[in-house]
């Protein structure tokens, strides 16, 4: 008979108290996009939970690459930042300042829109980690829903984000490849620069040029909502389905109302917290994975009530009570499953 040993492990976890008070610069995109408002909330949550100073910076628009670069250069000139977490407006738009940060030994985490590996090497930029949702998977999830809803051979079109933007490229590729493999016919793909009004205009033109279109995928929710408006203006509600990415509040409302088929949630607040947790490990000389994925989930009418932030208030103390079962052979018996209990 194997001896089974049971252990109660009681852990008192204190959040909000860090070994050192670190100052982290978090540089994100334009906060007129609710996605990045939610991301800021994630950074604020992490700052409160872990007792770290986080300065969040953002430009005035999604095209203000010089302004975003200037914010990072200003932080470098201040000279008192311990680390940077950055979401570049364009794949290489922050490279000159990031190269300076690397030269100074300041750790960097690249989040959400990832800088290509060849560009990092050319600019001598060293990253502690890359953290992003899988944008190819996000596009693929939307395509799977289209395949479920539409007849084989149905025509669909794509509204892209900004030309050259990594997130847009990956989402469009994920959707297009999956839709094509699933028997749908992608007849057009055009950029609308993440802009709702441009998406309305682009979608309106595509619907006129392609009267048999049955579905439109937009690479983010702002554009997706513009597409929904274009579909309604063309009198095609109920005939053309629309899906997009980000799960901003207005898009979730549109899903609940049946105007938007679905939106792929990326949880930008959770992405920000993951980045801060990883950076704190780096600053405390602990190892981290060089690449990490944050979750993506397709939100439809069936699960719309589960969408949105679930952060609550930053906890200051948690008491975890864990029951550990271990056999004398070092392996858990299949008839004795792992158990856990927790008290908060």
Image (spheres, rainbow, N blue to C red):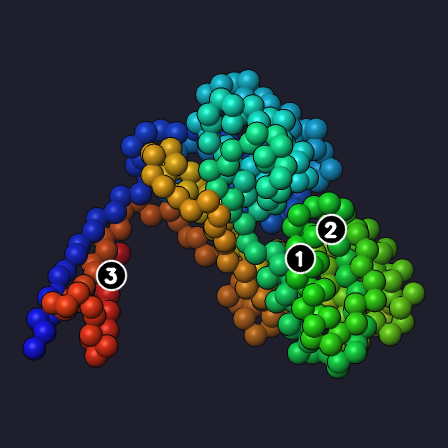
Q: Are marks 1 and 2 in contact (CB under 8 Å)?
A: yes
Q: Which residue is drawn at 73% across and 70% down?
A: 180
Q: Position of residue 179 (x, y in %)?
A: 71, 70
User: Which is more toward the observer, 287 or 203?
Assistant: 287
Which residue is denoted by mark 1 in the rendering?
171
Q: Residue at x 66, y 55 (%)?
A: 170
Quadrant for the N terminus in the image:
bottom left
Name the mark nearer the viewer: 3 or 1.
Answer: 1
Can you see residue 187?
yes
Name the mark nearer the viewer: 1 or 2.
Answer: 1
Work out how far the residue at label 1 is from the one at label 2, CA to CA, in angstroms: 9 Å
Which residue is denoted by mark 3 in the rendering?
342
Can you see residue 75?
no
Work out how far the residue at label 3 is from the one at label 2, CA to CA, in angstroms: 44 Å
Lower sequence index among marks 3 and 2? 2
Which residue is denoted by mark 2 in the rendering?
161
């Amino acid at each position: 008979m194997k001896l089974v040993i049971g252990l109660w492990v009681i852990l008192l976890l204190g959040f909000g108290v860090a070994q050192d008070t670190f100052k982290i610069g978090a540089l994100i995109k334009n906060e007129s996009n609710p996605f990045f408002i939610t991301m800021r909330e994630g950074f604020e949550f992490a700052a409160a939970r872990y007792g770290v100073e986080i300065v969040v910076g953002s430009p005035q628009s999604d095209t203000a690459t010089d302004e975003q670069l200037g914010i990072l250069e200003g932080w470098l000139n201040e000279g008192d930042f311990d680390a940077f977490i950055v979401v570049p407006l364009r794949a290489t738009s922050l490279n000159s300042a990031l190269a300076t940060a690397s030269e100074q030994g300041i750790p960097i985490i690249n989040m959400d829109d990832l800088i290509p590996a060849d560009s990092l090497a050319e600019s001598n930029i060293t990253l502690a980690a890359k953290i992003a949702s899988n944008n190819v998977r996000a596009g693929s999830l939307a395509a799977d829903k289209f395949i479920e809803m539409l007849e084989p051979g149905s025509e669909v079109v794509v509204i892209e984000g900004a030309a050259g933007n990594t997130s847009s490229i990956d989402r469009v590729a994920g959707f297009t490849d999956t839709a094509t493999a699933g028997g749908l016919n992608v007849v057009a793909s055009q950029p609308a620069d993440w802009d709702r009004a441009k998406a309305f205009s682009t979608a309106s033109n595509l619907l006129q040029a392609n009267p048999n279109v049955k579905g439109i995928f937009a690479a983010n929710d702002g554009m997706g909502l513009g597409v929904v408006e274009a579909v309604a203006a063309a009198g095609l509600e109920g005939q053309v389905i629309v899906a997009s990415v980000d799960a901003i509040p207005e898009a979730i409302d549109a899903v609940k109302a049946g105007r938007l088929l679905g939106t792929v949630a990326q949880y930008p607040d959770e992405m920000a917290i993951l980045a801060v947790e990883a950076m704190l490990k780096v600053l405390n000389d602990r190892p981290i994975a060089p690449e990490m994925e944050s979750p993506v989930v397709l939100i439809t009418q069936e699960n719309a009530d589960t969408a949105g932030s679930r952060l609550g208030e930053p906890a200051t103390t948690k008491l975890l009570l864990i029951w550990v079962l271990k056999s004398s052979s070092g392996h858990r018996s299949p008839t004795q499953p792992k158990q856990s209990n927790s008290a908060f």
